[in-house]
Amino acid sequence: MASGERRKERLDRGIKVRSDGIYALLSWRELGYLILPRLVLIVGLLLLPFVMPSLYWERVISNVCLYALLALSFDFLAHYVGLVSLGGALFIGTGAYIAALLNKSLGFPIILTIPIASVSGAAICTLLLLPCLPLRGVYFAIVSLMYPLAAMRIIEALNIFGGTDGIMGVDSFPYSWVEQYFVLVMVILFLFGLRRLVNMDIGLVFRGVKDNDQAVRASGMSITYYKAVAVFIASTMGCLAGACLTHIYMFSGISLFALDFSILPIAATVIGGGGTLAGPVIGCFILVPVSELLREFGTLRIAFYAVILMAFIVFKSEGLMVYGQRKYHQFERWVKI
Amino acid sequence: MLQILIYGTINSIQLALMALGFALVYGISRVPNFAHGAIYVVAGFITWTFLKAVGLNYFLSALIAILITGILGALIYRFMLIRVRGMAISEIIASYAIGLAILEGLRWGGFKGMTYTLPLFVPGSVTLGGVPVDIHRLLLIGIGIAVIALLWLFTHYTRIGLALRGMAQDERAALMLGIDSDMMALLATAFGSMLAGLAAIVLLPLGNIVVEAGYNVLILAIAVCIVGGLGSWMGAVLAAFLIGFAQILTVKYLGSHYQMVVALLAIIFTLIMRPSGLFGRQKELEERV
């Protein structure tokens, strides 16, 4: 058979030394080779509002960025700390409700509500999740899936925070370009910030917690402390997205705890490539516009990305970004056996 | 008082019926089937289609629906879950995505607006000590107890049932003893789906067939399995009674909004306090640090 006689050989490019993220640069060309993809991403993101001028697509760009923040937080927690959180909606909802309450009840301006909601929301989420942090794998996944559902039902049952009607008439961003650039810059900041973070010392500990928590504990470090720090970082992103969301739509309600916010980021991460951080962002840029185009089909959108999610997780679990990185960083050639 | 007792028992049996399929698949053979709720709703719609649109009799269309759901479960395992076997998180996400796709597809595909109902097995009601109860609900208690008993016999005295339990306890040892783990997992998914189908046919006549039921059934099933302890048989049944009575009491004293809150909080608190459940004693080291 033809396929039995030859195989594909993969060689790293010369500038790559031993491990991920360490490169030996000898020329400007090689520097350009490294900078190019990052530059394309940053410039591409910043130029987006100019390329997509219509009012409708401006809203889609903001949406993409909010989902990208959530997907980043999911990817960070799942692939660098080992906490698979199926409850991204908890972060969104908490951030959104805090921002809306601060704005409506206390009259705080938007410039204060977003940072306060991000940080205090993250603190609340961390406190809520604190008792679950010793749980591993599947158990944490199930618990985190239940939190937003429980939050939704409790708000409904107690009829607090506007009950099923939610909180209407929250202030919006002053100009739409402020809104878009704010979320775009946040995505870029958090993306590159997280990439830096996971390669710092604390990032190593995080990965240690994921791979072998007993070894981390044996080194005299508190696993729960590091997990809590990671959850705080991730939920800051989620709550920030929630706070922005409530100001963009001028509304906060129990629909913010809905499954959409838990499922789509996961689908984006799986499509983009888990563990790459940039992958989930790219995944969001593919999934969210496609699901916008499918808006007229109503709930079929959820069915649609559930199918994509399933197909990718079952048949192509590495994701686009990992595939792209392999093609970019390695030579491939067929070798006779 | 008697009312609470009677309706608590009925509610508990309902929960047990919903959860047994999930318990069989996840608790016994460690294949999480988060498409459970979707299969439950699908069974309802299939029965409705054969009963109302095709015009077969009730028993026959129920039988067909159960068979189809069994095949559906087997197909889901054979073509999807088998590829992610052993990666717990991927199993959950993949099966959950399947369920989501089925449910949202059904919602979009026209099963909305109009109400879809199945007729009661036996219409009418009787009065028990001053409390009126539908005959259907009384039948349900009998069916529930029969199913629980049959399943207990099945998992304790038949080769397949024993093999399923063996797989959950130690898959490698089971493999060494000549148990085909893929085949067993396939069977478990198929049986679990059939139980979901059976539960749907028994329970859906009490209300409308709606897509939301899929999500609620999944949550309740997870609640029962987790509170009872994964892998613990009697645990699941006892947990069904615990949650069942808790729900009836909260509905009576706090209001019907709290019914789902009880189940959700039960899941969260059980996982935090004792991840292996109130009655389970399996694999504690894998659950928490």
Image (cartoon, rainbow, N blue to C red):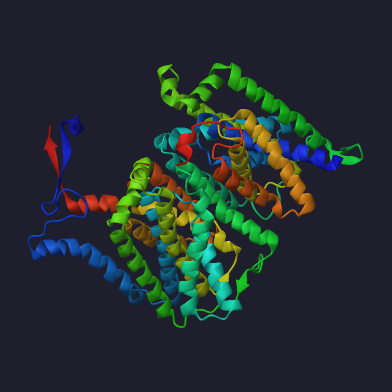
How far across and down, in percent of the image, does residue B200 sit? 67, 38
Left-right relation of B16 to A101: right
Residue ranking furthest to the right:
B130
In this view of the protein, which residue sits in the foreground, A80 or A213?
A213
Left-right relation of A273 to A62: left
Which quarter of the rendered picture does the C terminus of chain A lie within? top left
Q: Residue at x 52, y 27 (%)?
A: B187
How far across and down, in percent of the image, does residue B173 sit? 42, 21
Q: Note whether B189 is above or below B89 in the view shown.
A: above
Left-right relation of B215 to A193: right
How far across and down, in percent of the image, does residue B99 sit? 53, 44
Residue ranking furthest to the front:
A220
Q: Residue at x 64, y 23 (%)?
A: B152
How many marks are shown on the rendered structure? 0
Q: Residue at x 86, y 40 (%)?
A: B2
Residue ranking furthest to the left:
A26
Residue ranking furthest to the bottom:
A174
Q: Note whether A78 is above or below B74 in the view shown.
A: below
In this view of the protein, which residue sits in the foreground, B166 or B195?
B166
Q: Which of the 4 image quadrants contains residue A106?
A: bottom right
How far across and down, in percent of the image, does residue B9 sit? 77, 37
In this view of the protein, which residue sits in the foreground, A252 or B245?
B245
In this view of the protein, which residue sits in the foreground, A206 or B148?
A206
Which quarter of the rendered picture does the N terminus of chain A lie within? top left
Note whether residue B51 is visible: no
Note whether residue B74 is visible: yes
